[in-house]
Image: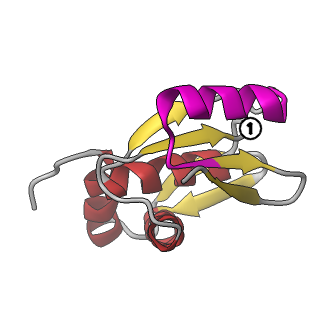
Amino acid sequence: MIANNIADFIAMNAIRRPLRAALIGDGRWLDYRQLERGMLAVAAALQREGVRRGDIVGLAMHDDVDHVVTLLAIARLGAILLPMDARWTGVEKQNVARHFEARIVVAATSTHAAWRRRR
């Protein structure tokens, strides 16, 4: 298997070393198998929201495991990451998303990621 992006390395390691720690943070850890499953689940959710290769996806999440899983899902789809500060106001995020023509913004809430469609 030839890697085209970082998400491919996760898939390769999920086969080669599925139970090895892949991601540790905020009191959680995921092995490569769990990381790949999470990445694919978020990628599928993004696809259901209309995200395709080349689309710009805003990401406004705190630095935690879910942030990394979502970032990898964006890479898996071949979408373009638009990093945003999770501390920005909703208006600030909307202005940046509008300026860069983001398809969607994934933003942190108190309990989970929320989707906000642009188109």
Residue drawn 43% across the image and 51% down it = 74
Q: Nearer the viewer, residue 6 or 50?
A: 50
Q: Residues within 10 Å of mark 1 (few under 14, many from 20)?
A: some
Q: Is residue 1 above or below residue 3?
A: below
Q: Is residue 42 above or below residue 56?
A: below
Q: Is residue 31 left or right of residue 14?
A: right
Residue drawn 38% across the image and 47% down it = 55
Q: Residue furthest front?
A: 119
Q: Which residue is mark 1?
A: 62
Chief secondary structure of the magenta span? helix
Q: Is residue 96 above or below residue 20?
A: above
Q: Nearer the viewer, residue 78 or 28?
A: 78
Residue drawn 9% across the image and 54% down it = 2
Q: Nearer the viewer, residue 101 or 113?
A: 101
Q: Which residues are drawn in magenta? A: 88-105
Instruction: Name the quarter where the N terminus is drawn.
Output: bottom left
Where in the figure is residue 95, as x and y percent of width and height?
67, 27
Which quarter of the figure has residue 85? Answer: top right
Residue 98 drawn in magenta: yes
Residue 77 drawn in magenta: no
Residue drawn 39% across the image and 70% down it = 18
Where in the figure is residue 73, as x and y percent of width and height?
45, 56
